[in-house]
Amino acid sequence: MVLISAVMLGPGDHATIARNSVMAATMIGLSLVTGLALLIGGLRHNVLRPNRAGVSAYLSLLVVLLAAAFALPATLGIDGTYTPSQAIIVVALTVALYVFFLFRQTGAQADDFREDRDASSRQPDPAPQPPSRHAAPSPRGMLREHGPEIAARVGVLLATVVPIVVVSHDMAGLLDDGLGRLGAPAAVSGVLIALIVFLPEAITTIRAAWAGETQRVSNLAHGALVSCVGLTLPAVLVIGLLTRQSVVLAESPANLALLAVSLLLSLTTFSGPRVTALHGATHLVVFALYGLAAFAPA
């Protein structure tokens, strides 16, 4: 979100940078990273068993957020952009949904996003224990217990984000100039930004799959996407309103079709009790098709 927002605030016309970057991040997360993780984890552990309640929550949010980001602007807006009144409503709804998600994720539904140890176990427990009935810690209690650590992490985050914001102003111009000289499609700039943004999550996700931590794979891949879309969409719309920039969000029919296939594939992959390397291979094929569409001549 910070990198995309900084590029939009920099020099030049970046009407489609948010659309291209978020779309690329979505396909990288849903297809490339998830596919690699499931392929590697499935080959090493044969089968993986996700916590289906948590994955379902992530994918439910992604269906709504991605529809608001890429599908509705083409039908409700003008020339692929929301009108100012529509943008305000979309910002309010997106922020409210994302805040409610965080409230539930860290509160009453916290167990949905933890590793399902009973389901992941290869050896059946001869004496199964009843599920834990301990109440999840409240956000206030977590803040009291981990306050100093949270403050330190926020400080490190700010210290690392500020240089990115400063450099991104010049980087956007250099990127546009370099890709223009190479004759690359405009969507490639979004793919490069998305790769930069998603690289840390990708490495950690694949490590989690190697360890057989299926729910952690979902928390990293799907959780990062929920944060990316849930924060970037309102941020770029607000920037567009304040700076009077045109924020083009409507996607092409080919990309909308691939997005729908990715979401449907993710729903079918994680709806069953087991996930295998075969599921990972299908996700990778979808990403290859996205690459074909991204580099297709206009």
Image (spheres, rainbow, N blue to C red):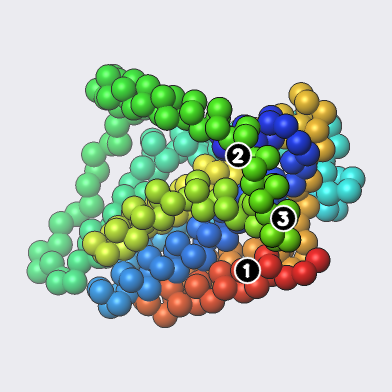
> What is the residue that sits farthest to the left in this orientation?
126
Q: Is residue 129 left or right of residue 139?
A: left
Q: Residue furthest bottom?
A: 278
Q: Amino acid at mark 3?
A: Arg
- Which disc, if any, is residue 290? 1
Find residue 88 and report its horizontal and vertical position in percent: 76, 31
Q: Relative to the observer, which residue lies in front, 238 or 85? A: 238
> As shown in the figure, which amino acid type bears the numbered disc 2?
Met
Instruction: Identify which residue is drawn at 60% across, 55% down.
Output: 191
Q: Secondary structure at mark 3?
A: helix
> Is residue 135 visible in the rendered structure shown here?
yes
Label located before the other in sequence (1 or 2): 2
Give the residue at x 23% y 52%: 131
Sequence-wise, the earlier of marks 3 and 2 is 2
Q: Is 231 on the left-hand or right-hand side of 51? A: right
Quadrant location of the N terminus in the rendered image: top right
Q: Is residue 273 above or below residue 156?
A: below
Q: Residue at x 57, y 48 (%)?
A: 193
Depth-wise, is mark 1 or mark 3 nearer the camera? 3
Considering only vertical position in the picture, is 8 above or below 211? above
Residue at the disc numbered 3: 181
How far apart marks 1 and 3 lie (CA) works out to 23 Å
Q: Residue furthest right?
A: 78
Circle 3 Cα neighbour tier, 10 Å, few/some/many (<14 / 14–19 / ≥20): few
Mark carried by residue 171 = 2
Q: Position of residue 93 (x, y in %)?
A: 67, 36
Q: Say which residue appears at 13% left-offset and 67% top-offset.
A: 125
| Residue 220 image offset from top left, x and y in percent | 40, 51
Q: Nearer the viewer, residue 276 or 18?
A: 18
